[in-house]
Amino acid sequence: MAMKKTLQFLFEHKSLDREQAYQLMIDMAEGKCNEAEMAACMTVYQMRHITIDEMLGFRAALLDKAVKPALEQPQLMDIVGTGGDGKNTFNISTLACFIVAGAGVTVAKHGNYGASSISGASNVMENLGYRFKNDASALNKELDRAGICFLHAPLFHPALKIVAGIRKQLGFRTLFNMLGPMVNPALPQTQVVGVYNLEMARIYQYLLQSEAQSFTIVHSLDGYDEISLTADTKIITQAGEKVLSPLVLGKRWVSPEDIYGGNTTAEAAAVFKKIIQGDGSWAQNAVVLANAAVALQASGRYHGYSEAYAAAVESLESGKAAQALKNLISLQAA
């Protein structure tokens, strides 16, 4: 189906089947669509819900066209949020990744520049001195020495590189926010995914249940795509689902102001450094530790949430998380 016909089809409130969605994403990845057509396509999914078949088709196309990083670690984890919740928090998922790495669980973090937020994972990693790469040898060295590597999405996904400028200009959540957590090219065996609403949680649950991997989906019921401790959190795993309070997950409630990420990428990076060096506020630390603890529990290495939370606290307070970051950045000059 030609792009103009596809757009007209979508404008008539019709949904693509899996094959049509696959071909549309392939066309985008191969540069067969102009910017206006791609912007129109993204706008469609701001105005209506995406279907599971569309998600499956888009995802399959992105993974088929992806650069495969050939990571040698047998067990990898990713902690990632969809973004697009409009909350402008500091980089909670990325900080949690370093706490998890400091606790000895290997992380292949997939991320991108913020399109609908001030500072995405790639913004803060770049500010910290990380150099984006898709060289397997360098990435494997990072995993060996730091327990974590970073996969900047546009280097692995041609379609994401092509639409990056359009997404930034649009400035709102698009279908690529929905797809991002599902297309880590390293195909990690364990995924912790934060979503901005319960509908996306259901779609992700359907997708992840069909694969032989461990997953945890989190959604704060007041709209955050992570455990925010500003409200109760819905947690979905293979074993079922539950709603837990901030007191259970983080020992305290926090306010939205406590987890604000700043007005610039430099401010976001400053918050990141302060927290990972052990100088974060009680509220900031509690939120990061709760997200890290859920991830550590998902790794299967700990008996229950309390033990996983204690491991997260030890990683942050002992300096192991900060050392993982230091080791990673030191390799950039090598």
Image (cartoon, grey):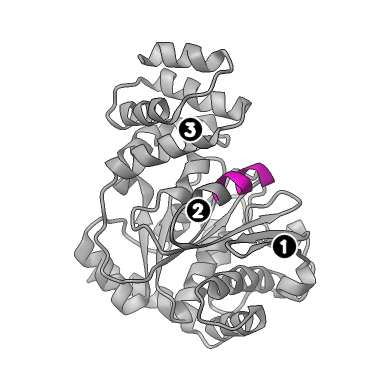
Q: Position of residue 168 (x, y in %)?
A: 48, 35
Task: Write down the region rendered in magenta.
Answer: 197-204
Distance from the alpha carbon under mark 3 to that under mark 1: 28 Å
Residue drawn 66% across and 61% down? 235
Few, some or many C-alpha atoms within 10 Å of disc 3 (few <14, some 14-19, many ≥20)?
Answer: many
Instruction: Answer whether labels 3 and 1 touch (C-beta < 8 Å).
Output: no
Residue drawn 45% across and 49% down? 182
Residue 201 forms part of the magenta stretch? yes
On screen, residue 109 versus residue 241, left or right, reads left
Precedes in sequence: disc 2 or disc 3: 3
Q: Secondary structure at mark 3?
A: helix
Pointer 2: what residue?
208
Few, some or many C-alpha atoms within 10 Å of disc 1 (few <14, some 14-19, many ≥20)?
Answer: few
Q: Secondary structure at mark 2?
A: helix
- Amino acid type of the residue that numbered disc 1 sits on in the rendered structure: Lys
Quarter of the image with the C terminus is bottom left
Pointer 3: what residue?
54
Pointer 1: what residue?
242
Few, some or many C-alpha atoms within 10 Å of disc 2 (few <14, some 14-19, many ≥20)?
Answer: some
State the count of labels. 3
